[in-house]
Image (cartoon, grey):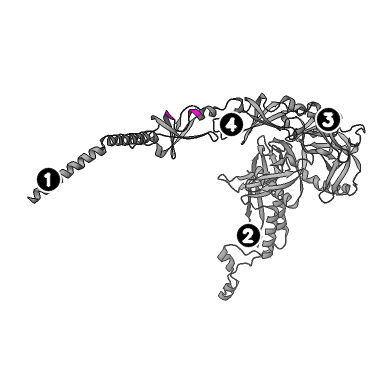
Amino acid sequence: MAEKKTKKAGPETSGEATEAVETVETNETVEAVEETTEAVEETPEIVEAVEAPVATEAPVNPEKFLKDFNWHNYEEGIDQVDDKQLKEFEKLVSENFVDTLNDEVVMGEVIHISDRDAIIDINAKSEGVISLNEFRYNPNLKVGDKVEVLIDVREDATGQLVLSHRKARVIKAWDRVNNAHDTGEIVNGFVKCRTKGGMIVDVFGIEAFLPGSQIDVKPIRDYDQYVNKTMEFKVVKINHEFKNIVVSHKALIEADIEEQKKEIIGQLEKGQVLEGIVKNITSYGVFIDLGGVDGLIHITDLSWSRINHPNEIVELDQKLNVVILDFDEDKSRIQLGLKQLSKHPWEALADGVKVGDKVKGRVVVIADYGAFIEVEEGVEGLVHVSEMSWSTHLRSAQDFVSVGDEIEAVILTLDREDRKMSLGIKQLTPDPWTDITGKYPVGSHHTGIVRNFTNFGVFVELEEGIDGLIYISDLSWTKKIKHPSEFCNVGDKLDVVVLELDVEGRKLSLGHKQTTDNPWDKYETEFALGTTHTAEVSEIVDKGATVEFNEDIVAFVPTRHLEKEDGKKLKKGESAEFKIIEFNKEFKRVVASHTAVFKEEEIANVKAAAAKAEAQAAEAKPTLGDANDQLQALKDKMDAKAKKAKK
């Protein structure tokens, strides 16, 4: 460590007082200080001959002594220095020395390089030592180079000046980055590596993030081509809290491109044909580079035929001619077309194609209501789902055809002006309703397949195109059915009878219960009014109970008719005799009573007892002769009493 010491010379014995500055150097000579010292020595204002009066023994005048006394020297201990000299000295110091304040960035000079360190002179009282690790980015560092350093510690415990080049670079780099962000200055950066979503760029020694979308105006397919390259960037965002920097290369060229776009758009005309290059392909269209400005070909403008994705027609970097359909000068949007360069297929459709002709085509689109068939390139016809089968039971178009199927159809309608065509598939087969009366006359028995349900019945298919309806009331003679699904399932086979036939309306009414005899005809006699039957109480319901006499007859017993002879009510599972008190064949209603059974017996017993009493009374009733005898006996008795009274 080099130290600089300065000492002041005292007055000489010759009687002349002079001031001189000597510089003692232990390691190195600082030329600036020597020049300053020489300048001070040569300045006549500084070096003056002061004639000292010869000491005499003359008496001292107190007033004069006090007047001439050097009070400044007495109080401060030094002679007073002229202000002009002091200012000149301060100027020389400020020009040749620096303030060694902590955390201050200053310029230094490399004065020596060892194997591990570099000695840096910052014009302080001592030099600083910095590890060469902080200069790894600059392998060509040499003596005499000027470098920025941060004064970490002005003087440590050993008196050493502690400097840092790395910290100085970071501080200066952030200052430059902030300035570049505020002023929009273009900066150079080195692309270090790839990262998720973009690249890492070294800007002034600080790592910045370059998003993939900010590399170029064109989509980037190979990010590795930018690694280890130096490029120009614009600082677009700084997060001071997290020390994050975002840069953009795209922003540098966008302004020029926008101006170029306006200029190109100003020269465009609708219907103009231009050559372009496929720049990007999306699911909804293709972006075309027209030489500095982009246009979009929507997927519907690529081909007269239906396509699922634009890559079926074009590929990246392909050159092709396009026509300008429309453009927006304000928003710089250009709508392009490719199919418009060729004649519309409907215009090329042969004049011989007419209604009733059979055509072949490929299924390109399937919807719920039908399928679109491409009969020629760009010419499509719709087969409605109702035209796919003679069946009146409509199903989804997917049940009949699939995308890509090659099918044959009949042209039903053809409108060349509106470019519409309707097709039919079922017309290729005979209409099954043409001879319906011969195949399915009223009263004939058949077997069909359950196709679907409604709330009011079941649709049964007898053959393809022939469906009939079984009303819910015609499913069973005995069961009470709330919904057809309680009786059968879709796909089940049912025996049916044709009940009604409407050829014009294409309606067929069927019945299932009519395939068997009506058991209620037999039950009308078996369960006639007043007949008695024995059964168990199956269920206790509101207002009464139900009793199952067999699998078809379920009778209802009102609550008041559940009473037994002992006054108690019948319970579930209890067996007893029941008397039929109501039978309705039409509504399949049967009402029974247990109470009526024993109450009628009581009535019969009462009637029998009354009859017996009447019979007994009749037997005991006197005859006319007997009555006369009795009357005669009574008269005789009365006469005897009268005689006795007279006596």
Q: Position of residue 575 (x, y in %)?
A: 39, 29
Q: Are marks 2 and 3 in contact (CB under 8 Å)?
A: no
Q: Is residue 306 visible?
A: no
Earlier in the chain: of badge 4 and badge 3, it is 3
Gap between marks 2 and 3, in whole Å?
133 Å
Badge 1 density bin: few <14, some 14–19, many ≥20, Cα 10 Å: few
With 185 as the anchor, is 68 left or right in this view?
A: left
Residue 69 at least partly seen: yes
User: Where does label 4 land, which residue?
Assistant: 485
Image quadrant in which the N terminus is located = top right
Instruction: Give the residue drawn at x 72%, y 35%.
Output: 368
- The residue depicted at 69 percent of the width and 39 percent of the height is 135
Label 4: how many Cα within 10 Å (few below 14, some 14–19, many 20+): some
Is 332 covered by the magenta stretch? Answer: no
Give the residue pinned by disc 1.
640
Q: Position of residue 301 (x, y in %)?
A: 84, 39
Q: Quadrant of residue 81?
A: bottom right
Q: CA distance from mark 2 to mark 4?
A: 133 Å
**Crowd tier of the residue under label 2, counting other residues whose Cα lies within 10 Å: few below 14, some 14–19, many 20 or above:** few
Residue at 84% across, 50% down: 329
Mark pair 4, 3: CA separation? 39 Å
Which residue is tagged 2?
11
Residue 509 in percent (x, y) is at 67, 32
Of discs 2 and 1, which sits in the foreground? 1
In the depicted structure, whether residue 571 falls above or below residue 155? above
**CB-based contact (under 8 Å), mark 2 and mark 4:** no
Q: Label 4 amino acid? A: Ser
Which residue bears the numbered disc 3? 410
